[in-house]
Image (spheres, coloured by chain):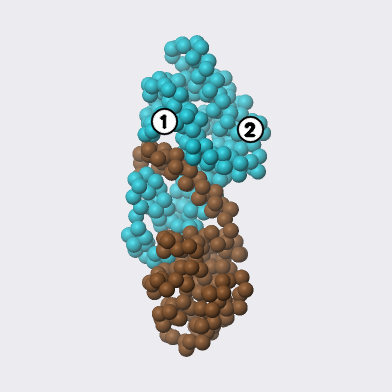
Chain colours: A brown, B cyan
Amino acid sequence: MEQQSNNPGGHAQRPDAASKLSDTLRWAFELDQSPALAGATWLTREIIPDAKDPYAAILAPTTSLDALRELKNAYKMLRTTGVTAAERSLAARLYAATIAAALVRHGTAISTQTPVALQRAFTELAEDGGMPEDLRAVASRALTLPPKA
Amino acid sequence: MTQTNWDLIRDAAADTPTSRASLEEVARRSWPAIYAFIRASGRSPDEASELTQGFICDVFLSRDLLGKADQSRGRFRTLVMGAVRNYLADMHRRRTATTRRPKHGSIGRLDDLAERSSEPAGMQALTPEAAFNSRYIASIIRAATERLQRVLLEEGDEAGWEIFRLRVLQPSLDGVSASYDEIAPRFNLGKGACAARLLVVKRRFASILMEELRATVEDPEDLQHEVAELLALLSR
């Protein structure tokens, strides 16, 4: 029974079973009581494994346009599936930040939102004192660029 | 059915139409941890199987351990581990080899259960307590995962279950993780959306797992302490 591929009891079949169980229990416990940033950071690292946090991933010059698109899609979903209002709000800011970064660094629009909606999202990000200064600066810079289709 | 351990234990100890099934389920969930403790105490696999069966029949069933397992009196894990320790000391003194039968007759499938609890590599290197805790947590994780699968499939979220299975369970079992590039197209998702979907399922799993653990502690506020203690025991 425990050797079936979808049977978690099989965890204990492995030589390093204790550490595997320990990892599972640890992340489950952390996810159960995580602050807003933890979920976004976990998501970011699923896409860019060595990212320090979402802010660093969005701001890094090495982050490709494709990676920004994937981050945008992940944060977009987190805007609605986040478990707390704080997490959903943070996801909305990060979502806007990825679009702004794609515009500023790659000159590419990665969103189908209207220019009005984007302008509002960039403005809210630029004025949010809870966000890192560098991220707010990217939003401010995006506001100065002409809208792209 | 999404019964917690304590639901099952209460039902198993009572005289209800479902108590026999609950008793078997409690025995099924507890067997691997009990076997692990006994095996790590230096017994051979055959001897450990025999003693585990003896413990289940003599203590779980005949001595009505479950009837004494009052949720207000402490953690079920501690109660069972203490009972196994006492049982081994008792057996060591008596050194009997009688065939054991529960007072209400066989509960069936104990031999099957023994096979299912086949031994994880390196278990003998653990202390009996660590071996017990490792298998105890494995059984709780298994119960939580079975519940998660049931809930997701009932909701029609096969994609959520498959993503969780491929990204979380399979790596734990085989050490091989399927990439998002392989998984996401199967569900018409991008990599980012697939990861976000997995986060939702992982949180669901975490919530179910914590519910399973919460059901084994005296006070819901003891949960944090119980998890910390189990993590520390597993880290040794």
Task: Provide the secondary structure element on which disc 1 rests.
Answer: helix
Where is the N terminus of chain A found, in terms of image quarters?
A: top left
Front label number (1 vs 2): 1
Circle 2 residues within 10 Å: few <14, some 14–19, many ≥20: some
Q: Which of A30 and B180 is in front in this view?
A: A30
Instruction: Compare marks 1 and 2 and give the one earlier in the sequence.
Output: 2
- Which x, y percent locates residue B180? 37, 60
| Label placed on residue A30 | none
- What chain does badge 2 belong to? B
Percent of width and height locating residue A108: 41, 81
* Residue located 43% across and 25% down the image: B39
Chain ID, mark 1:
B
Question: Is residue A87 found left or right of A23 in the rendered image?
Answer: right
Q: Position of residue B24 (x, y in %)?
A: 49, 30
- Distance CA(mark 1)–CA(mark 2): 29 Å
Q: Residue at x 48, y 55 (%)?
A: B201
Amino acid type of the residue that numbered disc 2 sits on in the rendered structure: Gly
Q: In which quarter of the image is residue B223?
A: top right
Q: A118 and A17: which one is in front?
A: A17
Q: Name the residue under label 2.
A: B74
Specify the quadrant that holds the C terminus of chain A.
bottom left
